[in-house]
């Protein structure tokens, strides 16, 4: 009965929203993969294999640095806005306008400081100029991200899905044009700016239809200060998190040739492309977690346990498939010039599994108001991560960075699991858990068959889905339950 009870708690729109968002993000991810494939081939064709790989390393260095900077600019505002807007009786219009003004302030201040700092760090002129271009794209991304709090509360996920697809399609179009014309790497960064600008515009128009906010509204200074201080602990933890998450790429750009970073960045791109699902579902679960956990943290246990089971159903075959088909994936993304990235992708495939569950447990921690603990966790993780990378990257390059990422993500997820367990949230173990594990074992066995890739993929999927239903880890009544609730508008 746990699944039915938990599903009764979760709004039906959550599942249809998840489907819509998943389709949109899958399409967006495919377009992103095509974009990388066009870019890498255009660079190697125009510049030659060695110079082309190094040029992609410049692109990766720019994006790694700006990713860290963008989280400084985020400052935890998005998470706190989403949480507060989800409270019963919340004035979401006032909350959004406050968050919007605060976001604009943090973007301007942070990016000006970041650009000045970039000229003090040992970056090449090519990377510094790329940052001047790319910072506009990161600004559009940050501004657009804030709208997700509105979409997630309303469980209206079609709009950001459209924005995602259209924006990535525009980026692909310009990458193709610039590649055909033989332009340099900074034009590919400019294509990223064009794509994020379109996504921002689509999300802005859609969000205004759901909440009649004014992006030029004057806000109360007291509200700004209150949100800033409320978001600060989460902002610090997010900064520490992204430093922990991206520091390996930055260290690679300092300690190894640009080609080494290019190999690692290409493998890492696969991992980043697949993180949309836990981030998306976790974001949509946040209002439910927040509402149920207001009185007692343990109230969200049924939803967390069910979510862990559902994550397992997708995570295990996903990670296993990435491991088995790593060489084919790298060949699609970068061609033979990037084949050294294959071992790194296999290692990162394992890290992806830990990231899924770490994201889920992290959202539960935020929902019960324990986000300050992230600061202590990430300080320890950064020390752990940076120390190992400094020791092993000079000798083992990007392969060492991949192994350190795996160790760090497992450690991070274990810490988050410990925190929610200590706060009375039961996060693992239903009667269906061993059935899911057995079905996953059958899937892994099928992937090991000495037959063609296509044949064993089909056999593995059929065997996996069939065994899930045969073992009653999934049942048709669950699907019927969701459709009936959606049909009658139940939430």
Image (cartoon, rainbow, N blue to C red):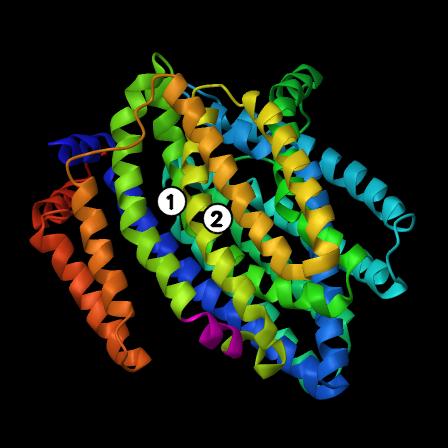
Q: Distance between the residues labelled 2 and 1?
A: 10 Å
User: What residue sits 28% from the left and 78% below the top?
Assistant: 450
Q: Position of residue 375 (x, y in %)?
A: 61, 25
Q: Is residue 119 left or right of residue 207?
A: right
Residue 295 visible to an observer of this rendering: yes
Helix, strand or loop for disc 2: helix
Name, please, the residue furthest toward the top: 295
Q: In this view, does 435 lie above or below 7?
A: below
Q: Along the horizontal axis of the image, is 140 left or right of 344? A: right
The residue positioned 53% from the left and 23% from the top of the image is: 371
Q: Quadrant of the N terminus?
A: top left
Count every numbered label the image shows and give the total. Answer: 2
Residue 231: x and y in percent read: 61, 24
Q: Which mark is residue 206?
A: 2
Residue toward you, 441 or 306: 441
Residue 139: where, in percent of width, then height?
69, 48
Determine the main secondary structure of the stretch shown in magenta.
Answer: helix
In the image, is residue 87 part of the stretch drawn in magenta?
no
Residue at position x 72%, y 58% from top? 395
Bounds of the magenta segment: 325-331
What is the quadrant of residue 419 in the picture?
top left
The residue closer to the viewer here, 16 or 381, is 381
Give the mark nearer the N terminus: 2 vs 1: 1
Residue under label 1: 156
Residue 208 in view here: no
Is there CB contact under 8 Å for labels 2 and 1?
yes
Q: Is residue 219 above or below residue 466?
A: above
Image x and y of residue 222, in percent = 68, 14
Q: In this view, does 95 lie above or below 273?
A: above
SS at mark 1 in the image: loop
Could you tell whether 436 is left or right of 126 in the image?
A: left
Instruction: Report the residue at 45% width, 21% height from top.
Output: 90
């Amino acid at each position: 009965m746990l699944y039915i009870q938990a599903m009764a708690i979760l709004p039906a729109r959550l599942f249809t929203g998840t489907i819509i968002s998943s389709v949109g993000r899958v399409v967006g991810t495919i377009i992103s993969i095509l974009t990388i494939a066009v870019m890498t081939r255009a660079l190697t064709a125009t510049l030659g294999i060695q110079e082309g790989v190094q040029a992609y390393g410049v692109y990766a260095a720019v994006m790694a640095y700006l990713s860290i900077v963008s989280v400084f600019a985020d400052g935890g505002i998005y998470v706190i806005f989403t949480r507060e807007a989800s409270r019963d009786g919340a004035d979401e219009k006032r909350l959004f306008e406050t968050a919007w003004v605060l976001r604009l302030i943090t973007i301007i201040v942070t990016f000006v400081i970041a650009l000045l700092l970039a000229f003090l760090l040992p970056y090449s002129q090519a990377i510094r100029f790329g940052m001047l271009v790319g910072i506009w794209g990161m600004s559009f991304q940050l501004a657009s991200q804030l709208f997700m709090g509105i979409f997630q509360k309303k469980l209206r996920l079609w709009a950001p899905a459209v924005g995602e697809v259209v924006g990535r399609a525009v980026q692909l179009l310009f990458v193709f044009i610039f590649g055909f014309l033989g332009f340099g790497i900074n034009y590919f960064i400019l294509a990223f700016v064009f794509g994020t600008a379109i996504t921002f515009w689509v999300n802005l128009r859609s969000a205004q239809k759901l909440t009649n906010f004014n992006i030029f509204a004057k806000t109360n200074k007291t509200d700004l200060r209150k949100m800033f201080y409320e978001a600060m602990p989460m902002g610090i933890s997010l900064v520490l998190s992204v430093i922990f998450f991206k520091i390996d790429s930055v260290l690679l750009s300092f300690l190894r040739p640009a080609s080494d970073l290019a190999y690692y960045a290409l493998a890492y791109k696969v991992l980043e492309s697949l993180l949309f699902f836990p981030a998306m579902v976790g974001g949509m679960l946040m209002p439910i977690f927040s509402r149920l956990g207001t009185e007692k943290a343990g109230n969200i246990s049924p939803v967390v346990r069910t979510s862990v089971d559902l994550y397992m159903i997708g995570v295990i075959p996903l990670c296993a498939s990435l491991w088995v088909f790593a060489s084919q994936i790298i060949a699609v993304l970068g061609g033979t010039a990037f084949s050294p990235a294959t071992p790194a992708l296999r290692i990162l495939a394992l890290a992806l599994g830990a990231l899924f569950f770490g994201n889920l447990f992290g959202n539960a921690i935020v929902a019960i108001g324990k986000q300050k603990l992230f600061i202590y966790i990430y300080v320890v993780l950064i020390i752990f991560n940076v120390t190992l990378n400094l020791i092993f990257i000079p000798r083992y390059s990007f392969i060492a960075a991949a192994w350190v990422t795996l160790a760090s993500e497992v450690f991070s997820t274990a810490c988050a699991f410990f925190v929610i367990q200590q706060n009375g949230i039961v996060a693992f173990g239903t009667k269906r858990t061993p059935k899911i594990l057995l079905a996953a074992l059958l899937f892994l066995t099928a992937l090991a068959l000495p037959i063609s890739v296509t044949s064993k993929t089909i056999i593995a999927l059929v065997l996996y889905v069939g065994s899930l239903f045969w073992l009653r880890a999934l049942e048709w009544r669950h699907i019927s339950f969701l459709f009936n609730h959606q049909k009658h508008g139940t939430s």
